[in-house]
Amino acid sequence: MLSSLRPRHEGDGLFSPSPFARRIAVRPGTRFAGAIEGNRRFGPRDTVLVLCTEEGRMDMANGTRFATGNHPVELLFPLMHLDAAGYDFRVLTPTGRPVAIEEWAMPRGDAATMDFRARHEDRLRTPGSAADFIARGMPDATRVAAVFVPGGHGAMLGLPFDRNIGEVLLCAHGAQRLTLAICHGPAAFLSMRLAGAFPYAGYSIAAFPDRADRIAPMAGYLPGPMPWYFNARLRHAGMRIVNHLPTGRCHRDRRLITGDSPEAANTFGRMAAEALLDADSA
């Protein structure tokens, strides 16, 4: 039993979740369902900017390293819903390096999800650079309908500390575009402070709770305590977290749509697609 609680050593000093944690939190199949198809109202805003992490190694407080990145279900499910609704998407990482993905969480038993990833693998391997996007004056910004920040612990690496990411988020907010973020994705909102403002003070969100991250090492999901806790920093900045557990909750506050975990990914994706279609028809 004790061996099943030990994080799995992936080599090169990296650890991924234990066999026990994987049985609880990682499914070979998925629950993707209910995509909206065939009723896309074509308008001038048809693209979603996807802000992904390019970093896949989290240094834990005890000196171990967690193999992380964007969670595949939290990345792919929402994109599958947006794609079905007729929206294009453009992937950005801070410097243009490939998107880091938590490969151990990939639902390899789900043909639809694996096919979608294969069809869009080039976008993940050769994303745009947020730095270049800002330097070039955010080209085609008028086509952007929303900005999406996927989850996974990797969303806490780089994104919250990147001024260019903050500029993109501030621009979307100022232009009254939808902002979508799931699980650890809201950590990226902290980057807006580097860009000169934090307009989300007073907003409420669903997010992966700090208390769940605090107990995750006990099940071997994480190899050690987190280096920092993003809920606490967002609360300090004036945000309110509406959930206490990762139960699949989704939440909308004005033009900000959030979800708390992989369990929320399907509902979150459909909710985002519906909101974009509603905005198109307004």
Image (cartoon, rainbow, N blue to C red):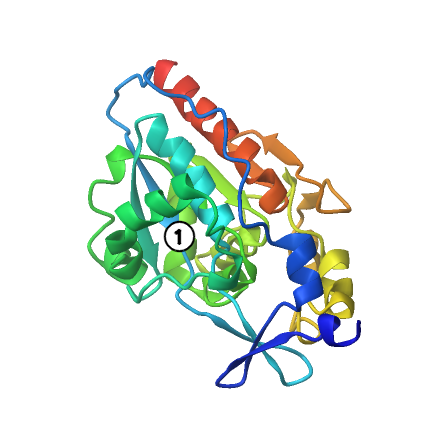
Q: Residues within 10 Å of mark 1 (few under 14, many from 20)?
A: many
Residue in the picture at 59% in, 31% down: 252
Left or right of 85? Residue 187 is: right
Of residues 40 and 176, the one drawn nearer to the viewer in this rendering: 40
**Splitting the image into 4 quarters, where does residue 265 fall?**
top right
Residue in the picture at 31% in, 56% down: 124
Q: Does residue 263 lie above or below 26 as drawn?
A: above
Query: Would you say residue 26 is visible in this rendering?
Result: yes
Q: Which residue is mark 1?
A: 51
In percent of width and height, residue 266 lies at 53, 35
Left or right of 60? Residue 173 is: left
**Mark 1, secondary structure of its residue:** strand
Q: Does residue 40 lie above or below 32 as drawn?
A: above
In percent of width and height, residue 101 lies at 44, 61
**Splitting the image into 4 quarters, where does residue 201 fall?**
top right
In percent of width and height, residue 118 lies at 30, 50
Quarter placement of the N terminus: bottom right
Left or right of 108? Residue 133 is: left
Quarter placement of the C terminus: top left
Residue in the picture at 43% in, 27% down: 273
Residue in the picture at 74% in, 71% down: 5
Query: Would you say residue 177 is visible in this rendering?
Result: no
Q: Does residue 43 lie above or below 127 as drawn?
A: above
In percent of width and height, residue 34 lies at 49, 24
Instruction: Identify the amino acid type marked 1.
Output: Leu
